[in-house]
Image (tube, rainbow, N blue to C red):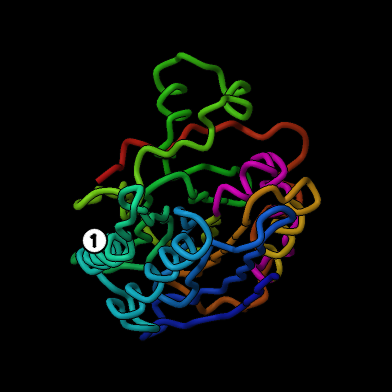
Amino acid sequence: MSTDEEGRSSLPHGSAVVAYSARTDVGRVRSVNEDAYLAAAPVYLVADGMGGHARGDAASHAVLETFRRHLEPERSTTPEQVLDAIHSSNDAVRALSEEGEEGTAVAGTTLAGVALVDAGDGELRWMVFNVGDSRVYAWDGRRLEQVSVDHSAVQELLDAGVIEPEEAERHPDRNVITRALGADAFVEPDVWLVPATGRQVFLVCSDGLTKEVDDDTIARVLAGGGGHAAGIAGELVDLALERGGRDNVTAVVVESECGDVSRADDETTKDREDAVGGDLDETAPRRGSNA
């Protein structure tokens, strides 16, 4: 089963116009989709549930419901409100864990997303947040950059220089994550604040996409997107399904115009079509702006 969605929002006073496309699919192997997404200004997020069938599904949807209660639709929010929603989501997911004969059956979920926030200085920023191995990418028309850093056993081995990137995809611990909502009483998300200026594109996705589709291919899809977010999420999910679809797969593509939004809505993003030729510059996950 697959769910598709597209939309467009204009925040108060013309400060930002945001378009998005989103799609989630159960994949070719799994019987239950434990992924879930929220795509409603000011927040766009993906949660990849864990714990098996009903618990994983319930965990990811608990995150969505918590964010809906904490953030006011169609208005920018604050970093503090987003953090409060994340911590409350952790509490909600922990409440789903059940005691049984074999101990506690723990529900959990990853979380990755972007939210348009007012940081208190009168300037809008995109707040990128992450817990687990779902990812947030930024696309500037030429380069795809992984903004978030995976909380995974494989990422720790890569950071320590124990394994090479080409070994990561087949490493036996490639599905082991080191941080998740619901795992502990307190969760520490990674957070980045990115200036919201001009036209920007973000991709938020579960690992069901990134384990099937490499970064170079993702960049080429974004480059050929015709200047708008519409339809790109579905194209990415289709690629993951064509390449095996071994897991649930979810993608949310967000395109914003912040500041001067007087330009025509159908303006094509600069340099998209000719941005991806042969090689793409490889970029490491951003760490310096971690808050």
The front one of 161 and 276 is 161
- The quarter of the picture where residue 112 lies is bottom left
User: Residue 257's spot in the image, x, y percent?
Assistant: 50, 69
The front one of 264 and 175 is 175
Above or below: residue 8 compared with residue 108:
below
Left/right placement of residue 84 relative to residue 219 reads left
Above or below: residue 271 compared with residue 252:
above
Category of crowding for the residue at label 1, using alpha-carbon neighbours closer than 10 angstroms: few (below 14), some (14–19), many (at least 20): many
Q: Amino acid at mark 1?
A: His
Q: Which residues are magenta?
A: 206-230
What residue does disc 1 label? Answer: 87
- The quarter of the picture where residue 280 lies is top right
**Residue at the limit of the structure toward the front, as seen here:** 101
Left/right placement of residue 110 relative to residue 170 reads left
Which residue shows up at 69% across the image and 44% down it? 213
Residue 246 lies in the magenta-colored region: no
Above or below: residue 256 compared with residue 161:
below
Which residue shows up at 36% across the image and 85% down it? 13
User: Residue 248's spot in the image, x, y percent?
Assistant: 62, 56
Which residue shows up at 35% across the image and 53% down it? 106
The front one of 258 and 94 is 94
User: Residue 233's spot in the image, x, y percent?
Assistant: 66, 63
**Residue at the limit of the structure toward the top, as seen here:** 162
Which residue shows up at 40% across the image and 26% down it? 156
User: Residue 41's spot in the image, x, y percent?
Assistant: 43, 77
Dot 1 falls on a residue whose secondary structure is helix
Q: Is residue 33 visible?
A: yes
Q: Is residue 119 visible?
A: no
Above or below: residue 242 compared with residue 276:
below
Q: How many marks?
A: 1
**What quarter of the picture does the N terminus occupy?**
bottom right
